[in-house]
Amino acid sequence: MSAYVNNNGVLIPAESYSIKAGNRAYIYGDGLFESIRVINGRPINIKNHVFRMKEGMKILRMICPASFTVDFIEHEIQTLIDQNGIDKGGRVRFSVDRKAGGFFMPHNNDIEYFIEANSLPNNKFLLNEAGLKIDQFEEMKKQINLLSSFKTKNGLIYIMAKLRARELGLDDLLIQNDRMGIIEGGSANLFIVSNGVLYTPGLDSGCLGGTMRMQIINIALANNIKVYECNISPQNLLVADEVFYTNAIEGIIWVGSYRTKQYINYLSGQLIDRLNELWKAKD
């Protein structure tokens, strides 16, 4: 746990904070959040995180304060990172919730924000040594709607997928949309590699609009690797050479097997090296 948290611009000891009665994120899931990686004691990729957060606020009809600029948010995060003594690797969770008031119909659309910052043992992105063992999550499907690509406070489908994976002795289960397309992992975007070409579900499939997904696509294109956004089926997974996940905190996570199919991690290893070069991560 953080030594301190930022509660609407005020640094307070983490253990002293208790949620306010009527908090709408707690009661209704009426909020958004961003998970942001820290490298060399500084938050990375802030512009893309702020852009996605503001777009999500717009969809949720939240009033974005004029003060919510990239510089302001970065300063708020950096102040907390420094206060918590994080000078190498870490992670930040930046939450935006609609202010308390009302039942399902809110009294207003003003917001509150809350920031947590924790250290991580690694100051760069590291590829997992053992590939994940995965399958499909059959019990629930993710709907395609205006909220699909944003990190809202309703993450129950991902929690249920993680719980089911543990029951099956697996590392993760793939989420499907309501059209039966495979769109993402339990906490990450999905990529498959076939004949040196990257394939990933498009945002119109209902997958999260991941900031790391965007970075990996850009890195791949900059290195003359073709990338296609398309529907992913179980058959695609069974003929792929490689499968990996991406998220903002871990970067790239390679998948070792899907059912009986085994995968290598050649391209995922190359891409994570390029990712570390981009952010000048140090040991």
Image (tube, rainbow, N blue to C red):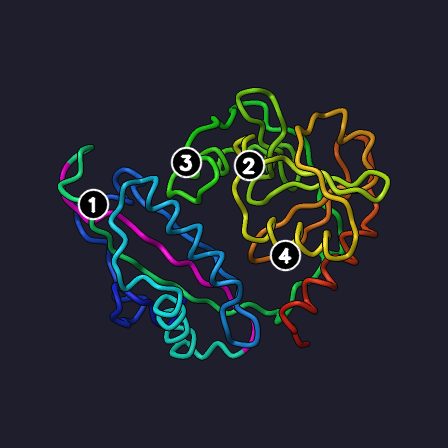
Find numbered disc 4 in the image and state the secondary structure of the residue it sits on. strand
Magenta highlight: main SS? strand
Tag 2 or tag 4, which sits nearer the N-term?
2
Name the one closer to the observer, 98 or 126: 98
Residue on which the image places disc 1: 109
Q: Nearer the observer, disc 3 or disc 4?
A: 3
Location of mark 4 (residue): 251
Residue 223 falls in image quadrant = bottom right
* N-term-proximal mark, 2 vs 1: 1
Going from the N terminus, do you reach mark 1 or mark 4 first?
A: 1
Give whichever of 110, 131 is nearer the camera. Answer: 110
Judge by depth and name the residue closer to the eye, 2 or 97: 97
Q: Residues within 10 Å of mark 4 (few under 14, many from 20)?
A: many
Report the residue at 84% width, 44% height from top: 196
Q: Say left or right for 243 vs 88.
A: right
Q: CA distance from mark 2 to mark 1?
A: 27 Å
> Mark 4 or mark 2, which is nearer to you?
2
* Distance from the alpha carbon under mark 1 to that under mark 4: 34 Å
Residue annotated with mark 2: 203
Specify the amino acid type for callout 3.
Answer: Leu
**Which is more foreground, mark 1 or mark 4?**
1
Q: CA distance from mark 3 to mark 4?
A: 23 Å
Alpha carbon distance from label 3 to label 2: 11 Å
Give the CA distance from mark 4 to mark 2. 19 Å
